Amino acid sequence: MDLGLDGETAIVTASSSGLGKGSATALAREGANVVIASRSPDALAAAAEDIRAVATGRVVPAQTDITVPDEIQALVEVTVEEFGGVDHLVTSAGGVPSGRFVDITEQEWYDAYDMLVMSVVRAVTAARPHLEASDAGTITAITSTSVREAIDGLVLSNAVRRGVIGLVKTLARELAPAVRANAVLPGSHETPRIEELVEAAVERGEAASYEEGLEDWAEGIPLGRMGQPSELGDTVAFLASDRASFVNGVSLPVDGGRLRS
C-alpha cells in the first residue's frame, strides 16, 4: 500500500533506537524526509546509517536532548532549514525509572514529567506553526499501554504518561481541521531495552535461553509473541498518511491484544 508520504517531512524524537527508530524507519521507507533526534551522537549516526539503507526519503540526524527547551526549538529550526517545513511530528521518549510509589522520590516525579509530558508540549509548541501551514499536518505521540491499564512496578509511567493522552485529545480538537493528533500505545516490543532485560534474566538463571526469556515477556499476549519496532512504526506511518485522514484524537493500542480494557 502506497501511503502517499513521498516528499513530506517528519520529525521523530528519541529515534536512535527502539520504537522511535522503528517509526522513523517506516516513515523514511514510505518516502518521507525524516529528521531523527537523540542525545547520543554515536547512536544517532548509527541509526541514520541503518535507516538510509531502506529509505526512499532523506534522513537527517540532529543531536537533541528533549528535556532541554532550546534544543527542541533548534530541532524544529534545523528541519525547516533543511526541508522548508514540518508535516509530521512523532514524539517518543526514553524510559523513566521503574519502582513502586513508596520508592519514588519527588525529584523523580518532576524528572518523569519533564521527560514524558513537557518534551511533547515543547515539541508541539515549536512545530505547531509549521504543522498548521502544511496540507498534511499530523502529531503522533508514542506512549504506552500503561495509560490504559497500570503495570506493576511502573508507577511513574502509569501516572505521568496519562498527561500525554489528555494533551493529544485536546490537540485533536483545538488544532483540527489543520492538524490531526493521535497516540499509539505500544505493548511489549523487542526493543534494545527488552533485549537487555532478557539477557540479564538469562545471566541470572531466570531463563534458560534468550528465546525462553522472550516467551516469558510474551506471556498473556493473544498473538503469542512480542511485537517488533517495525510493526509499531508501520502503524505510526499509517496514522501520518491520508489513509488515516478521518482518524483524529485516537489512542490506539499496538499490543497484540494483551489489553483487556
Image (cartoon, rainbow, N blue to C red):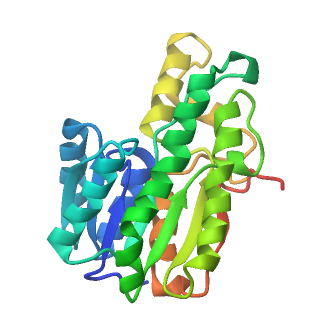
Q: Is residue 136 visible?
A: yes
Is residue 19 toward the left or the right of residue 97 in the image?
A: left
Viewport quadrant of the C terminus: bottom right
Q: In which quarter of the image is the N terminus?
A: bottom left
Residue at x 71% of width, y 26% of height: 153
User: Looking at the picture, does residue 34 appear above or below residue 201?
Assistant: below
Q: Where is residue 169 in the image (x, y as percent from the top left)?
A: 66, 68
Residue ID at (57%, 18%): 208
Determine the image quadrant of residue 23: bottom left
Q: Where is residue 171 in the image (x, y as percent from the top left)?
A: 59, 71
- Outermost residue on the top side: it is 204
Which residue appears at 29% of the width and 63% of the height?
76
Q: In this view, does 64 lie to the left or right of 206?
A: left
Residue at 65% x, 65% y is 252
Q: Quadrant of residue 170?
A: bottom right
Is residue 121 shown above or below 58?
Answer: above
Q: For the view shown, which residue lies furthest in the right direction?
A: 261
Can see residue 253? no
